[in-house]
Amino acid sequence: MSPAGGVRGAPEPVDLLLRGGSAVTMDAAGTVLPDAALAVRHGTIVWIGASSDADGRFTAARTIDAGGHFMLPGLVDTHFHTGQQLLRGKLAQLARRRQLKIPIWRNYLIPFEAALSEEDVHLSGLVGYGNLLSVGTTCFAEAGGPHPDEMGLAAREIGIRGIIARSTLDDADGLPDGATLSTGQAVEENLRLVKNWGVPSEENRVGAWLALRQLIVSSAELWDTFADLSKETGARIHIHLAEGTYEVDYATEHWGQRPAEHLDATGFLGPGVHAAHSVLLTDDELRMYQSNKVSVAHCPMGNFLIGPPKIPQMLRLGIEVGLGTDGASSGSLDLFQAVRASWVALQSHFATPWHARGEISLESLFAAATIGGARALGLGAWTGSLEVGKRADVILVQSQTWDLQPVTDAAFTVARSVTGRDVDTVVVDGKVVLDGRELVHVDEERLRARLAERLPVIMSRFETLIGAA
Ligand SMILES: [Zn+2]
């Protein structure tokens, strides 16, 4: 399976050898190797094949026995909110006191983010990215939040691959101080971020994109400027789109066009646009996504509260679809669970009413959580699957628990039964960052203590801001 590897009798030095796992590679051929080894040098996968063929071929600085494990590419979260990590459970608690104000994003999410200090975002980053790694996610795309440099520093520190971005709103009333920027500031801050961090690349594990929060809170001038900046810098634009009925009403009222129609007419849509949610789309709008090569972050845990996203049609049209969690405010960051939730919901909407089967497979959704997500972010050439020449973003998932036994078909078990908490070792860019379920680069005891100390301060500030104190 690989042209690389040492000649017999002259072992080749490698940095890391994973040996003995059942590899579900997610390559184009769907290769599954029941007893595989994978060798890593300078962060790159240099060899993958049968364990028996690896014996004597390499001398490894570290060898990990992957027996009793699945070896998978790390999962890719294509829509994540670092700044909402510590909000987990808070809205449920507030809702028990009084009815929440709608829309949630305006009344709670943006105020919460606006109240975070740089230090709070750094803490949210360590907690959030540690959480992602602990459930097998090795790459995230930030939707855009406050203090993105702190996100980048936390991502570098903990060892995850990621794309950071600044929350950008320049045309919104009634939001707290710090939530909105002038158009000039929004352009300047996004540009500075992209210049300082660079765009994500094979060599640049933590890069930056541009971000626009959503259509109804930013000016036409900003959208036009960002479209130009994206072409100039190569940084993609992360947006929320077709996420709410209010957005469709706003667009039809202002422009006589639906949101994606308007963005197509103004020349904004293009291959640099990554559109989270993308639920309320007509078939015409879907074709606009297709012709402009817009990528999609499908966030099943929230999307089905808005409507059934047309994922089967998108995949048939060749639109790049990745999975996203939309951050921790609504619950778990486990993409394995998101795959299954999405499949059940899509099946019940797009197939069951006609007694149809096979409209969408679990395996195709697991692909969206790995290689599909990497492609949706433009990172598919170097992550998302286990292939020679790609960066080594690999997870080991223990396969001996009773809920997974017997393993008759590894691809079935991975798509159907594994959960994030079965992950016990995570390698990103060739470096072990989760080892025996312990984060390697942060002191977890100290991080827990820091969180326990800081959380009450953040929450009391938030409650004062939203008038819930
Ligand atoms: Zn979002």
Image: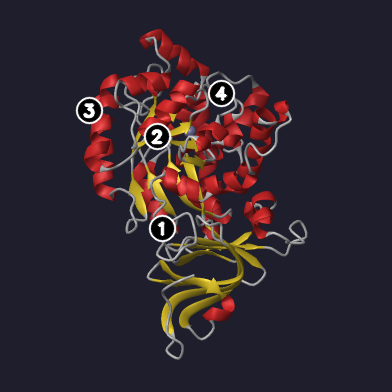
Q: Earlier in the sequence, mark 4 or mark 3?
A: 3
The reply to whether the C-beta atoms of the residues labelled 2 and 3 are less than 8 Å apart is: no
Mark identifier at residue 184: 3
435 vs 453: above or below: below
> Is residue 14 rendered to the left or right of residue 336?
left
> Is residue 217 rendered to the left or right of residue 357?
left
* Mark 2 surroundings: few (<14), some (14-19) or many (≥20) residues within 10 A: many
Label 2 – label 3 distance at C-alpha: 26 Å
130 vs 377: above or below: below
389 vs 269: above or below: below
Residue on which disc 1 sits: 157
| Circle 4: element type | loop
The reply to whether the C-beta atoms of the residues labelled 4 and 1 are less than 8 Å apart is: no
Tell me where residue 354 sits by quadrant: top right
Residue on which disc 4 sits: 468
Kind of residue at disc 2: Val
**Circle 4 or circle 3, nearest the eye:** 3
Kind of residue at disc 4: Ala
For the residue pair 469 and 389, the one nearer the viewer reads as: 389
Q: Position of residue 195 (x, y in %)?
A: 24, 46
Q: Residue at x 53, y 24 (%)?
A: 104
Mark count: 4
For the residue pair 437 and 418, the one nearer the viewer reads as: 418
Q: Position of residue 267 (x, y in %)?
A: 29, 25
**Circle 4 or circle 1, nearest the eye:** 1
